[in-house]
Amino acid sequence: MNPENFITTLTEQGFNLSSQQKEQFAIYYRDLVKTNEKVNLTRITDEKDVYQKHFYDSITPVLEFPDLFQGDKTLCDVGAGAGFPSLPIKILCPNLKVTIIDSLGKRLKFLESLVQKLNLDNVTLVHARAEDAGQNPSLREQFDLVTARAVARMSVLGEYCLPLVKPNGYFIALKGPKAEDELTNAKKAIKLLGGKTQKVVELTLPNSDDERTLILVKKLSKTPKKYPRQAGTPNKKPL
């Protein structure tokens, strides 16, 4: 998927990118590849692959659940790494207020520079472990939407993300193929943390065999105060 295919595919789905948005994606690609020579951000560096496997993949929640991104929503991205999925989503939905949580300073330094180059406003970067962020009063249950992509299995991911979601907000997990087993094992954790799975969407990235799964979880009630547990515990002892 080269940039032209990317733009055309989005146009077909009702998203007409402005010249500024097209340039933002182009800058993002160039900066990602350049920085990746010094800091390990991604194994994917070919332009066609970045546009498909990073940019398009990141915006699938907007394409599948467009109503959730209408208006001035707040989004928190847990373990964003090189900014996926939150920054491609932010480019597509400029009104979104984005908070990115990541535990690695080098990645956040790249993201800080990138946000400036992309001229994005309302993007906040937080250097923290997800477990610590979830117990931070200024972050806990403050967000309409929380996303995570390629971070952890669902039983662990729920404990990282659901404490950050407002009641009646949504957690969106971007997973690989055949995530149903993962979700089955996470049912107890999701319920305990105040969530309920609303929808599971299986899709294939355009012009490829790359399968993806989007899991949409609604936050029905507040997360018990003891969750998330201290850093490292969710991964070692999943709920």
Image (cartoon, grey):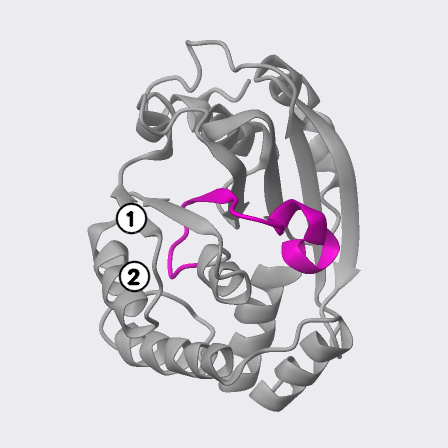
Residue 72, horizontal then vertical, whole percent: 51, 47
Type of amino acid at the residue the image marks with label 2: Leu
Q: Total label count?
A: 2
What label sits on residue 111 in the rendered view? 2
Residue 225, horizontal then vertical, whole percent: 43, 9
- Using the rendered view, name the quadrant where residue 164 is placed: top left
Residue nearest the observer in this picture, 238 or 143: 143
Residue 173, horizontal then vertical, whole percent: 60, 43
What label sits on residue 125 in the rendered view? 1
In what element is the residue under mark 1?
Answer: strand
Q: Is residue 195 magenta?
A: no
Q: Do callouts 2 and 1 mark residues in contact (Cβ within 8 Å)?
A: yes
Q: Residue at x 61, y 64 (%)?
A: 57
Taking 3 as reference, is 126 left or right? left
Q: Is residue 72 magenta?
A: yes
- Residue furthest toward the front? 71
Q: Residue at x 54, y 69 (%)?
A: 55
Boundaries of the magenta span: 61-83
